[in-house]
Image: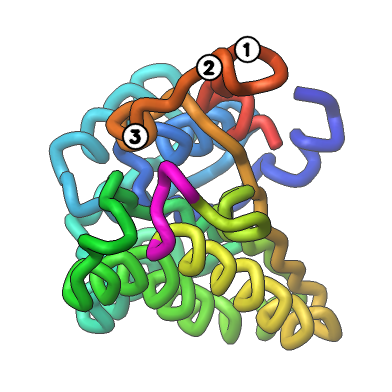
Amino acid sequence: MDNTMKDLVSGKIAIVTGGGSGIGACDARIFADEGAAGLLLPDIKLDAAQAVCDEIMAKHPQCKCVAVKTDVSSPEDVAHVFEVLEKEFGTLDILVNNAGVTKEIPFEDLTPEHWDRTYAINVKSAFLFCQKALPIMKAKGYGRIINMGSIAGQVGGLTSGADYATSKGAVLCLTKSVAKRGAAFGVTCNSVAPGQVNTAMARELHFVPENIPMKRVAEPEEIASV
């Protein structure tokens, strides 16, 4: 990373949802490498998030890292995350809404229940975390929010499914809406929209690398670097 990244991350406090694996775990590692003072990793899989925390603190003792078992679609769980944030860190500089789900389900077989669950994890969670984070960031006159989108949210999904693609389209619009509300207060909100990435979730979709112009999927570290 260059000095610009160090300037943005050094001494900062960050939340990374879904930080126990994949892109989220890589985000957390990069923030720690670049001098973050504290990381809060909400994840439904507490053991995975705690393992990432233990790894980070062993390598970077100056970076306090806390894992919290969280259903990111639950308002009560999200409220608890921010209670832990206040107790452990007292502030927030960076929020990465990374948690997400997708399944390879044919359009004709999608159920309303599955549709609602996809939206709850991919969209509602980002809304809940942004809603809690924005007042903190506005009050201090600084904040960086990054919502994990997808190229499917811009062009439609085939392998990933209509529920996933449309949920990521909603994330893009949420990002623009939050950006407008934070702009006057020194708070930015951006979305990163990867294509096919080598994560456990994406591997279940049976991507064909030969169909990609570079003949390979991206690695999580490449997306986290962005």
The percent coordinates of residue 20 (x first, y second) are 30, 38
Nearer to me, 96 or 32 = 96
Where disc 2 sits, the SS reads helix
Residue in view at x 70 percent, y 37 percent: 226
Of pointers 1 and 2, the one earlier in the residue sequence: 2
Where disc 3 sits, the SS reads loop
Q: Which residues are magenta?
A: 158-163
Residue tagged by mark 3? 205
Residue tagged by mark 2? 209
Where disc 1 sits, the SS reads loop
The percent coordinates of residue 215 (x first, y second) are 62, 12
- The answer for how far apart the CA atoms under marks 1 and 2 are is 5 Å
Query: Taking 1 as reference, is 22 left or right?
Result: left
Kindly indicate whether the residue at mark 1 contacts the one at mark 3 (C-beta within 8 angstroms). Answer: no
Quarter of the image that includes the N terminus: top right
- The answer for how far apart the CA atoms under marks 3 and 2 are is 12 Å
Figure quadrant of residue 11 = top right
The percent coordinates of residue 176 (x first, y second) are 72, 76
- The answer for how far apart the CA atoms under marks 3 and 1 are is 16 Å
Residue in view at x 31 percent, y 73 percent: 120
Residue tagged by mark 1? 215
